[in-house]
Amino acid sequence: SVHLFNKNGLQVCDLLMSGVLPRFPKLRVVSVESGIGWMPFMFEALDYQFLEGGGFGARPEFEKLPSEYFADQVYATFWFEEVATRELLGSRIPIDRVLFETDFPHPTCLFDDVDDKIARSLGHLTQGDRQRLLWDNAAELYRIAAPVSVAVKTNGRPARNSSRARSGVTMKKRTTRPRRSAKRVARRISRKS
């Protein structure tokens, strides 16, 4: 329900005001299934209340505003939003602290239309910003190698009429051996039993 997004916002505010982030500056936190549209209002309200409530004098462990701790240490995820990505991302929401998710396997997840949704949500962004949201932010956060991507655009349009081309992100063929599929592993285990 929509109430869950508000709860995530409250939990992020609690985290930002808890003093944990100033004490542990290398800590990184991800608010999953949170959406991002709530962020500008919550940050503005939180910073305002922090400053009006005594701010740095009352909370000496804080060296910056709560919203600045978010920008340095917290990530949020989105999957269905189009207004927030078009109107707020990059200007009011730090692009390097947002991760794309599909929310699979929940009822409101993106399943059949993932590439089309990416194109609608992120099509207005530069290739670099799309790459950051779809791969690079997560790769940095989790310290994993991101897939090699190739822009497939000619004259500002996708070169092919595939959904990956429409989203502006494609992947090169794998050069390493893929992991065994779950079915293959299950067959091997059942043969050994």
Image (cartoon, grey):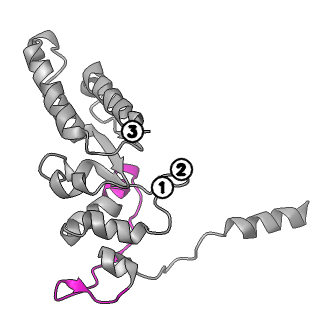
Q: Secondary structure at mark 2?
A: loop
Choose between 61 and 128: the one closer to the eye.
128
Q: Nearer the viewer, mark 1 or mark 3?
A: 3
Residue corresponding to mark 1: 109
- Expressed as whole percent of the image width and height from the top left, the position of residue 143 reads 39, 54
* Label disc, if present, on residue 106 of the rendered structure: 2
Residue corresponding to mark 3: 2
Left or right, 51 with respect to 16, comes to left
156 shown above or below 25? below
Disc 2 and disc 1 in contact, CB within 8 angstroms:
yes
Crowding around mark 3 (Cα neighbors within 10 Å: few <14, some 14 to 19, many 20+) is: few
Q: Secondary structure at mark 3?
A: loop
Choose between 182 and 111: the one closer to the eye.
111
Amino acid type of the residue that numbered disc 2 sits on in the rendered structure: His
Q: Quadrant of the C terminus?
A: bottom right
Q: Does 51 lie within the magenta span?
A: no
- Residue 171 in view in this figure: no
Q: Which residues are magenta?
A: 135-161
Choose between 30 and 40: the one closer to the eye.
40
Distance from Cα at disc 3 to Cα at disc 2: 14 Å
Amino acid type of the residue that numbered disc 3 sits on in the rendered structure: Val
Disc 1 and disc 3 in contact, CB within 8 angstroms:
no
